[in-house]
């Protein structure tokens, strides 16, 4: 087929003629004879089986076909240019993609500005974001159920095999629907009061060991592995539970949920304000794009020493 003989040089000459305004000027810019420019355009026209320029006028003017095909020619040249740049960056060690693992309670809105900046800075690096059913599943030091370059999780149970950088904190509050019995009680609500009411708990698919349960006070619990499911059950008034304040701010303002005035209970390690960290394995150091994103997640323009 004639189309199989198309070359990048022909597209380059085609665009050069359009931008230069004449065959002779395009030849000067490309350091070629005008006859070589004319020949390249003629061969391109033969192969696409249509005239690209109207030669009945003094200066070459794009034909209707040329007007239609010019954007495609420019796009091909741009794509090839980006291909060459990415190939050079990969040769220098740039990652082709990054995988982030986010804990279920991590507010994605907190990370969105860093992700937007990353898209601008590294448009060729693919970003894959996985949401884990529970935010403490990096306990074994090997990461979550599937490997990830960067984990954004709660920092209290991360092992020393992970290098971590503090990137913010979230505040957890206890909430229930206005129709729930706890909503009618005056505070502060202690652990003994809470123990008698069903608690909705975000957890792994199987029950976590008792010494690793966070924020569980009730004797009777329902376990869910999805944050949206927990939220829906609380809105339905089925139980009470602990959620990030940013997640339930609109519900509190609209009266769909109420903030329970609970006391802190410390015998099972419950926390109110939890530090978020971005972490990676010590034996799997990040590449240039990963280091850049890690610094941005921490609020900085450049890489900074990680927290120990």
Image (tube, rainbow, N blue to C red):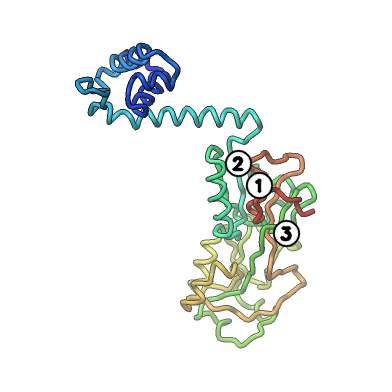
Q: Nearer the viewer, mark 1 or mark 3?
A: 1
Q: Earlier in the sequence, mark 3 or mark 2?
A: 2
SS class, disc 1: strand
Residue under the point 60% across and 59% down: 106
Label 1 belongs to which residue? 150
Q: CA distance from mark 1 to mark 3?
A: 26 Å
* Residues under numbered marks 1 and 2 in contact, where contact means CB atoms less than 8 Å apart: yes
What's the residue at 55%, 61% (across, down)? 227
Mark toward the start of the polypeptide (1 vs 3): 1
The x and y percentages for residue 134 are 63, 56
Position of 135 with respect to 256 (left or right) is right
Q: Which residue is at 23% across, 29% downward?
A: 64
Residue for badge 2? 98
In the rendering, at what x and y percent does residue 1 appear? 32, 13
Q: Are marks 1 and 3 in contact (CB under 8 Å)?
A: no
Which residue is the site of mark 3?
209
Between discs 1 and 2, the one toward the N terminus: 2
x then y, percent, for residue 157:
75, 57
Kind of element beneath mark 2: strand
**253 over 298 or under it: above or below:** below
């Amino acid at each position: 087929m004639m189309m199989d003989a198309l070359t990048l040089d022909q597209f380059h000459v085609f665009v050069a003629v359009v931008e230069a305004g004449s065959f002779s000027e395009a030849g000067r810019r490309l350091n070629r004879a005008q006859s070589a420019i004319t020949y390249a355009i003629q061969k391109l026209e033969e192969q696409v089986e249509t005239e690209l320029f109207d030669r009945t006028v003094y200066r070459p003017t794009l034909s209707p076909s040329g007007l239609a095909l010019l954007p495609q020619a420019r796009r091909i040249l741009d794509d090839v240019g980006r291909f060459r740049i990415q190939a050079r960056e990969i040769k220098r060690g740039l990652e082709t993609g990054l995988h982030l693992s986010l804990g279920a309670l991590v507010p994605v809105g907190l990370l969105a500005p860093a992700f937007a900046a990353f898209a601008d800075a590294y448009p060729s690096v693919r970003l894959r974001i996985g949401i884990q059913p529970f935010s403490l599943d990096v306990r074994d030091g090997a990461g979550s159920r599937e490997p990830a370059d960067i984990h954004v999780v709660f920092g209290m149970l991360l092992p020393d095999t992970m290098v971590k950088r503090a990137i913010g904190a979230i505040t957890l509050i206890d909430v229930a629907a206005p129709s729930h019995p706890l909503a009618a009680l005056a505070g502060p609500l202690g652990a003994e009061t809470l123990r008698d009411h069903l608690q909705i708990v975000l957890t792994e698919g199987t029950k976590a060991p008792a010494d690793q349960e966070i924020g569980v006070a009730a004797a009777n619990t329902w376990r869910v592995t999805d944050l949206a499911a927990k939220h829906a059950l609380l809105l339905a008034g089925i139980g009470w539970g602990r959620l990030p304040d940013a997640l339930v701010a609109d519900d509190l303002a609209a009266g769909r949920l109420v903030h329970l005035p609970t006391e802190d209970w410390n015998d099972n390690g419950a926390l109110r304000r939890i530090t978020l960290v971005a972490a990676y394995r010590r034996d799997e150091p990040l590449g240039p794009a990963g280091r850049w994103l890690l610094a941005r997640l921490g609020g900085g323009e450049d890489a900074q020493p990680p927290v120990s």
